Every structure is written in C-alpha cells, then in structure tokens.
C-alpha cells in the first residue's frame, strides 16, 4: 500500500465517521401502550300486538317480537277469577322468547263460549296487555 | 532504503522535541460539568373497557349512541334505546412515570366494533389532548388518568348481535 493510498483510506474513514455523527437519528423516547376493548350488543326493537275479532268480541291471540332468548314480563289487566277468562289464558309471568317472533294463541273452545271474550262491562280501552322486554 | 530509514529517524526526533517547547510556552485548562436526570420508566395500564351495553336499534332511520368521557352512562337518541341492567363504562387508562414530566399521548380517532363481516365505526372522544403532564414534580412518582368516551351511529338496518373491537393508546416521554 502506497502512502497515497493510506492517506486516501484514512480520509475516507474520517469522512465516514464525521458523516455518521452528523446523520445519526435523534434518540426518541420509547413509547409504551395499552389496549382497551370495546363492545356493544345491538338488539332489534321489541314489540307486541293483539289479534281481536270485532264480530265475536273475542281476543284470538297476542304477538310478541324481539330477540330470541329475550325475557319478557307479561301482564294482562282485565276480567279475572273465572276459569276461561283472558287473564287465565295469557301467562302473567316472565317468559323467554324461543324465536324472534312469538304468538300466543287464545283458541275458542266449542261449547264453553268465547274463552277470550272481553268483560261485558268493559270498554275496549279497559283491556291492558303489557309486555315488558327486560 | 538506508537513506529512508535515516530520514525517518531524524524526523521522529524533530517531532518529539516540538511538544516540549509547546507545553512550556502555552498551558491551559478548562472544566466541563457532567449531569444526568434519571426518570422512572413510563407505564400505562388499562383500567376499564369501552362498554356500550345493550342497545335497541331504531325501527326506522339512524339513531345515535354515545358514552361521554366524563361519565359511564350510555346516551341513546333518535330512535335508539339503551337498556338498563348491564354495566356500561367509558375506557380509562392510568399513566405512571416521573412527576412533572410531559408525556405524548397517541389515541386513534376511530376504531371498529365487528361481528363477523358486520362493522360499526366508533368515534373516540378522549378527555386529553396530544400531551399530558404527570402529577407531582421531578424526583417523585407522577401519574395521570386518561378517559376515553365514544359514540356511533346506529341505523335500523344494522345487523343485531354482539359487536367487539379493540384500540390502543400509546404514551411516550417528550
């Protein structure tokens, strides 16, 4: 190796060292993180309705719509006490929907009169069927 | 070859004599100070998740669902209904480190709740800006709490079911 080559090599080394010092990236503070979970349960709107026969003045059924497996509290305010009245035909308790749409039929039994007949003295507005989606 | 060696020897002798003259003629000194500030490592811990609970979608149109960053209560409007009976919460994090230090906070503006191929985009609402200052002063432990609320639109066409997702919060010393 000649002296010229040695000088050239030394210059190259010095140049790299200087360049390395000048171009070194700044040291950044190391970040730390944490992860949070998010969740929501979207439900379809629940609803209820009744099937009422104006000709026979009878209630033939009630309908419920909601989420499968949803518990619903049922309440019927109307004629009570006698066997075969509306209050006895609709469960006044908590039930669980087996499907998204559920129907409770109130069949008419021949020979026993209209089983789901409204109270005679009651106006239509006095019948209350309440389904509360819990 | 012999001449070269002689020349080098003479050169070395000449060079070695020079520093002796320089030291004697010009001596000086100065003092540099050394310092370092040791700070505690920074940590962030998730305290609670962002839980919206059970929400009934509107029959028509698009409802809104939100949790403020100052409350754990879900607010639903425009046809959407938030059901009671389940614990809901905003997301909360605790940052621990050196007291009085400024910390950079990185929180995404949105994240997705998904259920299979269905998705809900949640807009996040943190109660801090891009930085927070830890409590107390240098040489003492400091901390800060980050609360993150959020909200989303809920159209009547959204598929029902349980949606889940995650988002990351990152902190670093400035």
Image: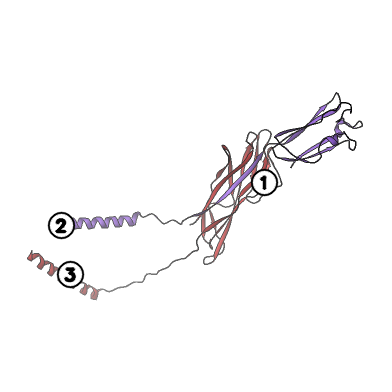
* Depth order, front residue of A36/B98: A36
Which mark identifies residue B15?
Answer: 3
* Host chain of mark 3: B
Which mark identifies residue B1?
Answer: none
Report whether B51 appears left or right of A15.
Answer: right
The residue most toward the right is A121
- Give the secondary structure at mark 1: strand
- Give the secondary structure at mark 2: loop
**Do dots 2 and 3 share one subunit?**
no
* Host chain of mark 1: B
* Depth order, front residue of A21/B40: B40
Q: Which residue is mark 2?
A: A2
Determine contact: label 1, label 2, CB under 8 Å: no
* Chain assigned red: B
Where residue B32 appears, x then y in whole percent?
37, 69
* Depth order, front residue of A110/B125: A110
């Amino acid at each position: 190796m000649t002296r010229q080559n040695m000088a050239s090599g030394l210059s190259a080394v010095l140049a790299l060292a200087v360049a390395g010092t000048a171009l070194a990236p700044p040291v950044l503070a190391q970040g730390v993180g944490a992860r949070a979970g998010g969740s929501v349960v979207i439900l379809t709107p629940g609803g209820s309705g009744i099937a009422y026969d104006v000709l026979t003045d009878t209630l033939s059924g009630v309908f419920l719509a909601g989420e499968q497996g949803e518990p619903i509290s049922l309440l019927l305010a109307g004629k009570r006490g006698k066997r075969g009245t509306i209050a006895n035909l609709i469960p006044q308790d908590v039930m669980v929907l087996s499907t998204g749409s559920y129907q409770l039929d109130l069949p008419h039994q021949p020979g026993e009169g209209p089983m789901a007949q409204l109270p005679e003295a009651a106006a239509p507005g006095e019948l209350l069927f309440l389904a509360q989606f819990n | 070859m012999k001449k070269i060696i002689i020349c080098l020897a003479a050169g070395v002798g000449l060079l070695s004599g020079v520093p002796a003259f320089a030291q004697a003629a010009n001596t000086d000194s100065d003092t540099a100070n050394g310092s370092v500030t040791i700070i505690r490592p920074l940590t962030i811990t998730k305290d609670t998740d962002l839980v919206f609970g059970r929400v009934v979608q509107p029959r028509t149109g698009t409802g809104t669902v939100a949790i403020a960053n100052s409350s754990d209560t879900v607010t639903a409007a425009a046809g959407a209904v938030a059901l009671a009976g389940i614990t809901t919460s905003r997301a909360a994090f605790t940052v621990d480190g050196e007291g009085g230090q400024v910390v950079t906070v990185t929180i995404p503006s949105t994240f997705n709740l998904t259920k299979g191929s269905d998705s809900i985009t949640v807009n996040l609402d943190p109660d801090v800006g891009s930085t927070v200052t830890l409590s107390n002063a240098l040489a003492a432990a400091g901390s800060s709490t980050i609360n993150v609320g959020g909200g989303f639109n809920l159209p009547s066409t959204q598929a029902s079911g349980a949606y889940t997702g995650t988002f990351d919060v990152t902190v670093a010393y400035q």
